Image: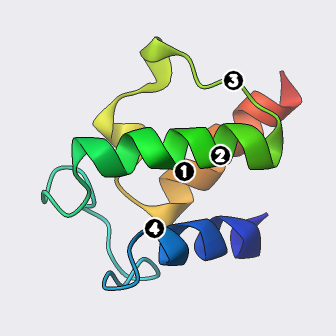
């Protein structure tokens, strides 16, 4: 799952060090268009539904946070 997420993120923004960055949203690294694209990719790839209540910075600030969200939604 992590490898798939990293592939998606790297395709989206090859200029970002996703392995080490923990302020993707709060640091302004990912912009709103990036999030829209990311949500679409995650929805398709993992067969999950990311609801509006899930669209908070804490869920997208780091790879680990995104993995936690994906894992939670896959299990629902």
Q: Quadrant location of residue 13? A: bottom left
**Residue at position x 50%, y 49% from top?**
38
**Real-space Cα separation, disc 3 to disc 4, in angstroms:** 20 Å
Looking at marks 1 and 4 on the same chain, the residue that comes earlier in the sequence is marked by 4
Label of residue 18 in the image = none
**Real-space Cα separation, disc 2 to disc 4, in angstroms:** 12 Å
Q: Which element carries disc 2, helix, strand or loop?
A: helix
**Real-space Cα separation, disc 1 to disc 2, in angstroms:** 10 Å
Q: Answer with left or right where residue 38 lies relative to residue 29.
A: right
Kindly report which numbered mark, 2 or 4, lies closer to the viewer in this rendering.
4
Contact check, label 1 and label 2, Cβ < 8 Å: yes
Label 3 Cα neighbours within 10 Å, binned few <14 / some 14-19 / many ≥20? some
Looking at marks 3 and 2 on the same chain, the residue that comes earlier in the sequence is marked by 2
Residue topped by disc 4: 12
Label 1 Cα neighbours within 10 Å, binned few <14 / some 14-19 / many ≥20? some
Residue topped by disc 1: 66
Q: Which element carries disc 3, helix, strand or loop?
A: loop
Looking at marks 1 and 2 on the same chain, the residue that comes earlier in the sequence is marked by 2
Label of residue 49 in the image = 3
Viewer-proximal residue, 29 or 64?
A: 29
**Real-space Cα separation, disc 3 to disc 2, in angstroms:** 9 Å
Q: Answer with left or right where residue 41 lies relative to residue 33.
A: right
**Residue at position x 63%, y 53% from top?**
67
Kindly report which numbered mark, 1 or 2, lies closer to the viewer in this rendering.
2
Q: Quadrant of the C terminus?
A: top right
Residue topped by disc 2: 42
Kindly report which numbered mark, 3 or 1, lies closer to the viewer in this rendering.
3
Contact check, label 2 and label 4, Cβ < 8 Å: no
């Amino acid at each position: 799952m992590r490898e798939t997420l990293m592939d998606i993120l790297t395709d989206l923004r090859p200029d970002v060090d996703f392995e080490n960055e923990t302020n993707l949203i709060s640091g302004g690294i990912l912009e709103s268009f990036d999030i829209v694209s990311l949500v679409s990719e995650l929805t398709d790839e993992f067969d999950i539904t990311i609801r509006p209540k899930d669209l908070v910075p804490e869920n997208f600030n780091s790879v680990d946070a995104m993995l936690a969200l994906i894992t939670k939604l896959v299990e629902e």
